[in-house]
Image (cartoon, grey):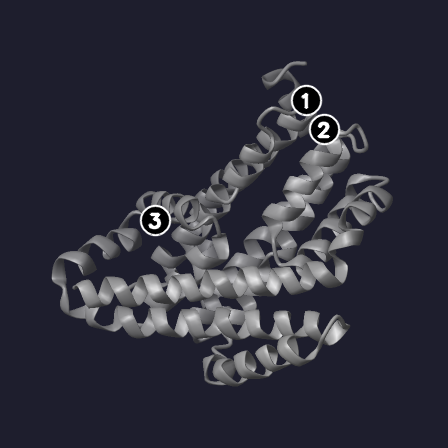
């Protein structure tokens, strides 16, 4: 059992290091313009959504985009409505990592790590060094998930643990709670979903339980935004609370349609890994587009909950 735990932890650490390394490279390329872009292209919530999605796809961190939005609100450079548009877009942009994981490019991971590391060492202070960080991080991300899947294989022989995980299939609320908890621990919804995909690859969790964890991860990822709002002005705290409310309301909105959602995802692919990735994309895209026309109402509700 200790070997399984050690293998899973090692895989998760490599995965998280890969994400951080890739983010470091992406931010080195585009990071200095993040706040400028967030402030410049957020004239209305729809523009904010597009900007938030693009910047999150570039930086590979919805938490960073949301935290930047909170900081700009705190500085008086963005309104609550503008920040909400950015946060809606950030939820869409973060789906890119999950789609990348779903294609199982793990066999190419060692080559990517080697080539990326070579570019970092030989690239000097050029764009190639930054690209090297991105490639190395992407390789680590994919390799880490492969290691997690490999380590989780023996769990199929542990009946008590398999029964615990199977509860996610029978009761989506337990899966949602697991998603919230794992994301709070990992500080990464992508890591939580990656581990869930590894469990699915080993046959330990199906589409129903996996999607429940995905829904929970969307709530758990708000912790970073809440932490970023501590000690800030009232409107910045309102932005963080609005982020939490949006994700919670999105999950509550989907739960009555959960069975229909699963049927739609089963039609989208024959592979449960791709089904989970598609479910993550569909949930984030759908809830963002549904919430966009109601941004002003959500802002009004949050201002009542967190008065200035």
Which of the two discs, 2 and 3, sits closer to the camera? 2
Left or right, residue 176 beside residue 99: left
- Mark earlier in primary sequence (3, 1): 3
Query: How many numbered marks are there?
Result: 3
Callout 2 secondary element: helix
Tell me if residue 292 can be seen: yes
Whether residues under marks 1 and 2 lie with C-beta atoms below 8 angstroms apart, the answer is yes
The residue labelled by disc 2 is 74
* Residue at the image position 44 percent from the left and 44 percent from the top: 255
Q: Is residue 179 above or below residue 248?
A: below
On the question of residue 201 being in view, the answer is no
- Horizontal arrangement in the rendering, residue 42 relative to residue 230 (left or right): right
What is the number of the mark on residue 87?
Answer: none
Residue placed at 54% from the left, 40% from the top? 224
Q: Quadrant of the N terminus?
A: bottom left
Q: Which residue is mark 3?
A: 175
Residue situated in front as seen by the camera: 62 or 231: 231
Label 1's element?
loop
Q: How many neighbours does mark 1 have within 10 angstroms: few (below 14), some (14-19), or many (20 or more)?
A: some
In three-dimensional space, the C-alpha distance between marks 3 and 1, rounded to whole angstroms, equals: 35 Å
Q: Which is more N-terminal, label 2 or label 1?
A: 2
Label 2: few (<14), some (14–19) or many (≥20) C-alpha neighbours in 10 Å: many
* Quadrant in which residue 270 is drawn: bottom left
Q: Which residue appears at 76% of the width and 50% of the height?
A: 34
Residue identifier under label 1: 233
């Amino acid at each position: 059992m200790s070997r399984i735990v050690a293998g899973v932890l090692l895989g998760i650490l490599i995965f998280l290091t890969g994400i951080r390394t890739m983010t470091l490279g992406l931010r080195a390329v585009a990071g200095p313009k993040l706040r400028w872009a967030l402030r410049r292209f957020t004239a209305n919530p729809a523009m904010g959504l597009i900007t938030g999605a693009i910047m999150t796809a570039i930086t590979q961190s919805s938490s960073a985009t949301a935290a930047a939005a909170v900081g700009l609100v705190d500085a008086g450079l963005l309104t609550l409505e503008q920040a909400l548009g950015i946060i809606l877009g950030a939820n869409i942009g973060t789906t890119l990592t999950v789609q990348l994981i779903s294609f199982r490019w793990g066999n190419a991971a060692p080559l990517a790590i080697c080539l990326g590391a070579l570019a970092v060492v030989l690239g000097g202070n050029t764009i190639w060094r930054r690209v090297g960080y991105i490639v190395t991080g992407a390789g680590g991300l994919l390799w880490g998930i492969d290691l997690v899947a490999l380590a989780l294989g023996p769990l199929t022989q542990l009946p008590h643990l398999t029964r615990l995980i199977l509860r996610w299939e029978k009761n989506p609320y337990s899966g949602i709670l697991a998603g919230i908890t794992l994301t709070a621990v990992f500080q990464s919804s992508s890591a939580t979903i990656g581990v869930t995909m590894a469990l699915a690859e080993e046959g330990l969790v199906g589409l129903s339980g996996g999607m429940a964890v995905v829904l929970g991860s969307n709530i758990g990822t708000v912790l970073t935004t809440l932490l970023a709002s501590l000690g800030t002005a009232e409107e910045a705290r309102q932005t963080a609370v609005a982020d939490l409310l949006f994700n919670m309301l999105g999950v509550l909105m989907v739960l009555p349609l959960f069975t229909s959602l699963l049927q739609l995802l089963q039609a989208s692919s024959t592979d449960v890994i791709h089904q989970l990735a598609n479910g993550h994309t569909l949930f984030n895209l759908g809830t963002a587009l549904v919430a966009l026309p109601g941004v002003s109402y959500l802002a009004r509700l949050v201002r009542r909950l967190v008065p200035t």
